[in-house]
Amino acid sequence: MYRHLYRNPTILSKILIKEYTNLKSEELAFRYAALAKLRTQELEFEALHQLDPVEQWDISKMSLLPQIFTLLTNLHRATRSDSLISYPQVEAVNRITALLDPNMFPIQDLSLKLHTSDSVTIWDKSKTQRVTKNLGFKLNLKESTIDHSDAGQGVFLETLPANKRLVPAGTLLGFVPGVIYDNYQSYGEKTPPDMHFFRFDGPIFDFTSKIYYPYLPGYGYDEYEQKIQELQDVAARSNRPYRNKQKGGFELINGEDINPYALGHKINHTPRNKSTNVCLIDIFVPQSFFPQELMKFWPTQYFSTTQDFLQNKSLLDHHYKNHIRGLGFISVTDIQDGEELFLDYLESCLFNMEIESPDWLIKPPPLHPQICKCNLRQESLLMMLLEDYAFSQTKDGKNFDKFYKSILRENPQYL
């Protein structure tokens, strides 16, 4: 809803952005910490209110890191050293050429001429069952239960009977895949407004973009392209074509192809008469914290690691330094086996109110008061101006002066 502030910065919008970023940081810090306590059945929420936001973010991180480790470790145990992506046509040709005398049949470059864009992920039924057995749940894509023509497929939770057939609140269920841009200026409106997640501190998660595979530590999207160009230049000088899909090469793939739990972008908006059961959660993993054998399952990449990632300073500056950014989704209620996951698109800043809203985009019921820091919802004049300034830039918005006067008229204490 506040994208216009970031897209066309002015003196007023920068003031509003700073206020909004800090307030949203406090709100999410409390929510993530409360969900961490819910998961461990430590229900001392009053004590949480006494902590500052940085301490609350630390509580969230201490709960998230073991869950991330468990999820990535189980993916690794199911695959070991196997390649996560295969190319059946290339492999078939390689098997044939290995049996032939290259002097008699010069077809060593035949694989380069094949159309091998249809890669195959390693995540077949047997491997996902192995992960589910150890982790206790998996995610399935199937026809949504929402009675609407636009619903399409939804994301459903499947648990094992031994796991009591439910997942408790505060459980990390998966990730959002794609490319991370540090701000709207570097992003450049590459996808439609409802095809990326916009975060409160400025970064954009473009889940329509593919990422490079295999994983290289410290590489961003543009660094991969530079590396590929260097390989192509070397191949050109040696008159040998660059084999993009063979040993030593890199390939653009969907994040969910390397991590079957990277389905956050496929979760439907909460429909009428339903409650939101998951929310997005901002992930900060210390650099070099997990080994490369686990990070190969990380479904996001920075567009560039050479730019300052955080443009808008906030209460969480130390979390951004020397950390790898990610975006996950976490349960905000206990979720039963077979239940469809629902995400609030408005609260998650997925849908942009600057375009015409579809009929299904309604505001869901609020989250449970236990995980909400209610005092942040006090109607300060500055936050009211933020809401109205953002709305004044939409198609349905009115003149900003009228909004300002309406605030004063409805809130005479500001006169």
Image (cartoon, helix red, strand yellow):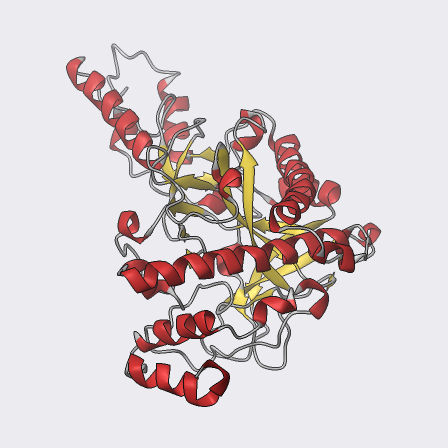
Looking at the image, the residue that sits furthest to the bottom is 409
Camera-side residue: 184 or 223?
A: 184
Camera-side residue: 6 or 304?
A: 6
Q: Position of residue 241 (x, y in %)?
A: 22, 22
User: Image height check: is 344 above or below 218?
Assistant: below
User: Image height check: is 217 above or below 142?
Assistant: above
Q: Is residue 195 visible?
A: no
Camera-side residue: 172 or 107?
A: 172
Q: Quadrant of residue 147?
A: bottom right
Q: Is residue 306 visible?
A: yes
Q: Say which residue appears at 26% left-offset and 21% top-offset.
A: 231
Q: Quadrant of residue 302?
A: top left
Q: Say which residue appears at 50% left-offset and 29% top-offset.
A: 83
Q: Position of residue 3 (x, y in %)?
A: 35, 63
Query: Is 272 left or right of 121, judged from the image as shown?
Result: right
User: Image height check: is 168 above or below 240?
Assistant: below
